[in-house]
Amino acid sequence: MKKLYISVLLALVAIGITSCDDTTNTVGKSLTDNTDILEVSTSIYEVTSRSLKTDSVLSSSTTGFLGKIIDPETLGDISCDFMAQFHSVEDFDFPNEDEIITDDHIDIRADSCEIRLFYRSFYGDSIAKMKVQVSELAKPLEEGNYYYSNYDPREEGYLRTDANALKKTKIYTLANQEVSDSVKSSSSYVRSIRIPLNDPYTDKKGNTYNNYGTYILQELFKDLNNFTNSYNFVHNICPGFYFEIQDGVGSMAYISLCQLNVYFRVIPDGKTVRNTSLTFSATEEVLQTSTISNEDEIIEELAKEKECTYLKTPAGIFTELTLPIDEIMANHSADSINTAKIVLNTINNKSQIEYAFDDPETLLMVQKDSLYEFFEKKYVANNKTSFLAELDDNIYTFANISNLIKHLYDVKNLNLERDPNWVAEHENWNKVVLVPVTTTYVATASGTTRLARVMNDMSLTTTRLVGGENNPYESLKINVVYSHFKGR
């Protein structure tokens, strides 16, 4: 119990120790009796870093990105398109077929149909004219497949290409001049891009309807089972749509919600006509992916700079760190590493750039060889082999990666026992990557929150970090606090 009590106090002591000091030999005496002496020491080691260009990231997200802008830092184009599927809830509230107003009392029909792309934030010029093309998917995106940001749905055969395929274009501005100022000033107003689907539509079987909404309504009453869950809906009724920028430059919308709305009329009491609708939304229950296009040559040149390292999204540049594991553990294999702290300073010159991108808010530190697996397997930071750091006053602080140091050291030694060439064959064994991410926390029954999801940050961000091969600033360091008990 004595050592357990001391280890709790040690965590507090370690925070205050930031440099080597001969007087640390007295720390143990102040915390222990004559039976156990806690010896504490600190060391500082240099960490090397470099920019790491990434051609793509896993793009499954609850946000769709739509637009084309000129990066003010590189003057290169960045364009984003996205695919979305729609969710049909399991407790779907079916309208009564005999209540729906029909066409000459023969066929059920919708009055209109639309897709709404709701966004709460955007980058760029709200009055820039943009042209989006909406294309019907020929087949749904499948769970279990990994869709990266360089995925081309057209080349991969995901778009319906026959002569009757739904294809609709829409010219829009994010200022949405189709909506009056009085409506926009309402507290309930949410900005959106409205894409009507009211032209005649012919399905894959050759059946023609006055609009896409009528197709949905008539399919509903042919087989209600196709609307009872998302799997049936996307496989049998609506595989989804691809939203692709065709023209224009100047804005990027962060689409928070995508809706398919079908409007029709009912007479529930046989006398009074009432307007109603069916709504299908792109939610976390179905897949949504973004396709990112950067000018690779420009990004490549940026990543080659030696005076700093970069973090750039979407799908641009990460920062790689090489951790001095062997130096840290030399002559300390029997010690406890209480803290191992890395502080990353940003280099801020954005005041010189008009419409500069924001800094990434959150960074993930993950082993380089586990980078793709982390996102594909939907892992979350566990503070053992992966860690998060939030931006605070232009600084990212990984306060304690001691578990990772010990883990990497143990893995290396275990494998060297089996294969003396292991280190030479595994050059990334001591490398980690810093990745801009977004996080989702959920409430627990105890009233706290827990980290539920970590995804690649697909928004427009950029920052420079102190580091690099020819770093002109103070070197990037890791501050390590050791301790061990010595009997007297």
Image (spheres, rainbow, N blue to C red):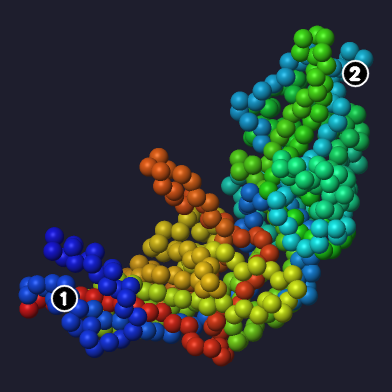
Q: Is residue 403 visible?
A: yes
Question: In the figure, residue 420 lies in which quadrant?
Answer: bottom left
What's the mark number on residue 325? none
Q: Is residue 328 visible?
A: no
What's the mark number on residue 30? 1
- Is residue 416 rendered to the left or right of residue 207? left
Residue in view at x 78 percent, y 63 percent: 124
**Would you place residue 415 above or below residue 59 in this image?**
below
**Would you place residue 165 above or below residue 476 in this image?**
above
Residue at image mark 2: 103
Residue 423 locus on image (x, y percent): 41, 78
Residue 468 locus on image (x, y percent): 56, 84
Taking the view exactly as shown, the residue that stands out farthest to the top is: 270
Q: Nearer the viewer, residue 447 or 331?
A: 447
How far is mark 2 from mark 1, CA to CA?
89 Å
Q: Describe the element under mark 2 as helix, strand or loop.
A: strand
Residue in view at x 57 percent, y 77 percent: 346
Say which amino acid is labelled 1.
Ser
Residue 200 locus on image (x, y percent): 91, 33
Say which amino acid is labelled 2.
Asp
Residue in view at x 44 percent, y 63 percent: 386
**Would you place residue 138 above or below residue 342 in this image?**
above
Residue in view at x 69 percent, y 44 percent: 257
- Is residue 143 rendered to the left or right of residue 211? left
